[in-house]
Image (cartoon, grey):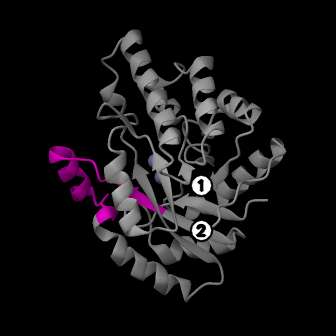
């Protein structure tokens, strides 16, 4: 049974106002909702200016959001978690650890959103690449994902096969990649999530997709629930889909000790 949605967004990144998201979580029958807004402590120069311009800057606004969460807690019976979706960049573990330690979130979700600085969700980054080039990006993606698990920086690993969302990178994942990811998570305290970000959308699959999911399950890996909802209308529909998905596989969602 799905009790906690650990991965949603508020208007402190690219999502909706906190109270509306909380009402939607109540209506979906959840016992708790976690706000994991986008945060990056490693971007520099143009990349940093772009994030600041878009408002993806929880590293600068988390204290203000915390006040909003505290206020929202007085208006509901369900739990509201003060969390973060942090970009993981290999080699920058010390900077990430220092920030997480100082900020003191309820928990941290770690995400690989880029390979060598290229955002893996932007088709334009990959349309010009041939097969070998795309394969190299996907290799790099799984290396980063395994390094994220090895780093033990995060409680949850977001959308394990995010690259599958991007048509130019879809279909390049191999059995070796799945085994690499499964070995890393089987050996880590970081729990991957089942992420519903695109299951009712153009892509139509959960993350992880069936073959990776099966490999992870074979290695005894558990999963938290992440609707990755950015709007109240997405919460209930995605929680229903997640509920069915966990039931279909005969598994219970993992809960965090928060
Ligand atoms: Zn993400
Ligand atoms: Zn997200």
Residue that numbered label 1 is attached to: 227
Residue shown at 61%/38% (left/top)? 185
Q: Crowding at label 1, few (<14), some or many (≥20) Cα neighbours within 10 Å?
A: many
In magenta stretch: residue 177: no
Kindly report the distance in space between the C-alpha atoms of the residues bearing marks 2 and 1: 10 Å
Residue shown at 72%/70% (left/top)? 29
Which sits in the foreground, 98 or 8? 98
Callout 1: helix, strand or loop? loop
Which sits in the foreground, 112 or 102? 102
Q: Mark 2: is the Cβ under 8 angstroms from ligand 2? A: no
Residue at the farthest bottom position: 74
Residue that numbered label 2 is attached to: 33
Quadrant of the image occupied by residue 204: top right
Callout 2: helix, strand or loop? strand
How many numbered tags mark residues here? 2
Determine whether, in the image, residue 104 is placed left or right of residue 258.
Answer: left
Q: Mark 1: is the Cβ under 8 angstroms from ligand 2? A: no
**Is 23 located above or below residue 248 in the figure?**
below
Quadrant of the image occupied by residue 226: bottom right
Residue shown at 61%/43% (left/top)? 199
Quick check: can you spot residue 109? yes
Q: Crowding at label 2, few (<14), some or many (≥20) Cα neighbours within 10 Å?
A: many
Residue 250 appears at what percent x and percent y? 84, 45
- Residue range of the region highlighted in magenta in the rendering: 36-59
Determine whether, in the image, residue 91 is placed left or right of residue 68.
Answer: left
């Amino acid at each position: 049974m799905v009790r906690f949605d650990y991965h949603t967004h508020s208007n402190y990144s690219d999502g909706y106002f906190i109270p509306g998201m909380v009402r939607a979580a109540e209506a979906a029958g959840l016992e708790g909702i976690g706000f994991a807004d986008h945060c990056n402590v490693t971007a520099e120069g143009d990349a940093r200016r772009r994030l600041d311009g878009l408002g993806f800057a929880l590293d600068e606004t988390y204290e203000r959001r915390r006040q909003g969460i505290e206020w929202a807690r007085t208006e509901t019976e369900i739990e509201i978690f003060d969390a973060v979706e942090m970009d993981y960049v290999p080699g920058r573990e010390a900077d990430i650890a220092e920030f997480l330690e100082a900020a003191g979130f309820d928990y941290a979700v770690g995400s690989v959103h880029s390979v060598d600085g290229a955002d893996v969700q932007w088709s334009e980054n990959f349309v010009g690449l041939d097969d070998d080039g795309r394969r190299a990006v996907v290799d790099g993606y799984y290396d980063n994902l395994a390094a994220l698990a090895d780093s033990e920086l995060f409680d949850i690993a977001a959308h394990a096969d995010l690259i599958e969302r991007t048509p130019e990178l879809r279909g390049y994942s191999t059995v070796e990649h799945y085994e690499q990811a499964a070995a890393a998570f089987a050996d880590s305290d970081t729990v991957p999530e089942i992420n519903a970000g695109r299951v009712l959308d153009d892509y139509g699959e959960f993350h992880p997709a069936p073959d990776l999911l099966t490999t992870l399950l074979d290695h005894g890996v558990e999963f938290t629930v992440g609707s990755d909802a950015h709007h109240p209308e997405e919460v209930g529909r995605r929680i229903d889909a997640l509920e069915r998905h966990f039931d279909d596989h005969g598994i219970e969602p993992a809960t965090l000790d928060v």
